[in-house]
Amino acid sequence: MQRSELTKAERLELADHLAEDRLGEINKHCRDVKVRTSFYTKYIKRLFDIIISIIFLVLGLLVNIPLAIVTRVKLGKGILHKSERLGKDGKPFVMVKFRNMTNERDERGELLPAEQRVTRFGKFVRKFSLDELLNFWNILKGEMSIFGPRPLPPEYYHRYNKEHVMRLAVRPGLECPPRGKNDHIRTWQEQFDNDVWYVENVSFKTDCICIVNFVRYFLSRKNANARASAAKGIFMGYNEKGVAITLDDVPQEYIDKVFGDKTETALAE
């Protein structure tokens, strides 16, 4: 079975196999993560979140209203896209964005890859992160923060190693800008390592640095194009060396083994 033929259910099953086969050994080599707490993280950071989210929600009306109208014209009914994400301590919440993709499916009824469903207008919206403006409502409610690890789907939870799962020890954010050079599209490994660093070093100074890095990240043409195309790939787990991988990185031999064993079991029954 080729990876392009896998259904969503089969991708989930493949990720479960990777976790079962590899996480035990990988976790033996993971370091312990110590979450940084302070007066700032307990009180001041949240105060900033409330003030900033109210300002952006009010100012955002100037963008959100015309954005809603154009989205309705381009994509029809259902201008909002609701998706479940994991927040602090793994608590799920619903994140709302303006739709920027169609619901096109293949002959099996599976949604086409995200990069194939993003509309031309959607690419513009994603490029400038306009679809993120509604997330300030999640920030105001206390489900998110301005800065913090990006909230990801619940199915990723059991795929994290014990170090990367600590990215859920703080409120997720609109963005967790990279600290190093911003000259390439980040891999999942780079993103998760950066998230964990933030968890261990969050402070007023760190968030000030995040502001500067966010501007650099936002203005990067490569990252803007990556946001527009939605082509980062699905986080599936880790390779044998403990590096986070996407579906494209899973060896075909491993896929054949998982679903070959499944076929043999079905035939035996």
Image (spheres, grey):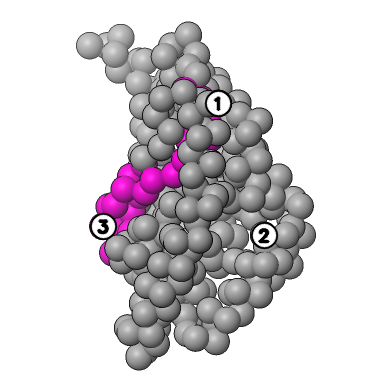
For marks 3 and 2, the one nearer the N-term is 3
Q: Earlier in the sequence, mark 1 or mark 2?
A: 1
Image coordinates of residue 149 in percent, x first then y, are 47, 63
* Amino acid found under the numbered disc labelled 2: Phe
Label located before the other in sequence (3 or 1): 1
Query: Few, some or many C-alpha atoms within 10 Å of disc 3 (few <14, some 14-19, many ≥20)?
Result: few
Q: Amino acid at mark 3?
A: Lys
Residue 74, disc? 1
Where residue 223 appears, as percent x and y from the top left, is 69, 52
Tell me which segment is drawn in magenta: 83-103
Name the foreground residue: 53 vs 234: 53
Q: Nearer the viewer, mark 3 or mark 2?
A: 2
Looking at this rendering, what residue extends furthest in the left direction? Answer: 269
Q: Is residue 98 above or below residue 196?
A: above
Q: Which mark is residue 91?
A: 3
Residue designated by label 2: 218
User: Could you tell me which secondary element the residue under label 2 belongs to?
Assistant: helix
Q: For residue 209, which quarter of the picture? A: bottom right
Q: Residue at x 59, y 66 (%)?
A: 177
Task: Give, as a three-letter code, the residue at label 1.
Answer: Lys
Q: How many marks?
A: 3
Label pair 1/2, CB-CB below 8 angstroms? no
Instruction: Measure how far apart labels 1 and 2 are at the Cα level.
Output: 25 Å
